[in-house]
Image: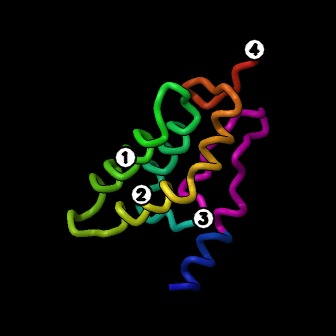
Amino acid sequence: MKALVDAAKAINAKRSTEGADGVRQSDGCTGVPDWNIRKCCEKHDMDYMNPATSRWEDDCNLRKCMRAKMCWWNPLPMIYFIGVRVFGASRHAAFQEYNYDDEGELIMD
């Protein structure tokens, strides 16, 4: 299992969170395997950039998206939910420091 987690971290480390045009982009499921839920993680990243939603709401939406893509008995949605609740505060704060629109583009005031 450790080898799998290490491989996922190496893949995630290569992903950029900012495109060449300066637009903030999702890096998928940061620090953990994407499995078949990359779209859920990308939406979660975009939700974090939206100041109109709370972090709690964003994290709950991630769990709901994951549950819709997995078997009802799969524990991963709850594990990932706990992970973003424990480790997501700094990332959410970093995104909230700047003002992004719904597409993740920085709004210049």
Please say if 19 is above or below 67.
above
Residue where numbered disc 2 is placed: 81
What's the distance in space between the residues labelled 3 and 1, CA to CA?
19 Å
Whether the magenta-drawn stretch holds residue 29 is answered as yes
Q: Secondary structure at mark 3?
A: loop
Magenta stretch: dominant secondary structure: loop
- Residue 61 sits above or below residue 49 on the image: below
The amino acid type found where label 1 is placed reads Cys
Find numbered disc 2 in the image and state the secondary structure of the residue it sits on. Answer: helix
Q: CA distance from mark 3 to mark 2?
A: 14 Å
Look at the numbered discs 3 and 4 and tell me whether their residues touch, using CB distance below 8 Å.
no
Query: For residue 109, which numbered disc appears in the image?
Result: 4
Compare marks 3 and 4 and give the one earlier in the sequence. 3
Which of disc 1 and disc 3 is earlier in sequence? Answer: 3
Tell me where residue 78 appears, x and y as whole percent: 35, 62
Q: Badge 3, how many Cα within 10 Å: few under 14, some, many 20+?
A: some
Query: Dot 1 surroundings within 10 Å: few (below 14), some, or many (20 or more)?
Result: some
Q: Which region shows up in magenta?
A: 11-31
- Amino acid type at circle 3 is Gly
Residue at 70% x, 26% y: name it.
106
Circle 3 residue: 31
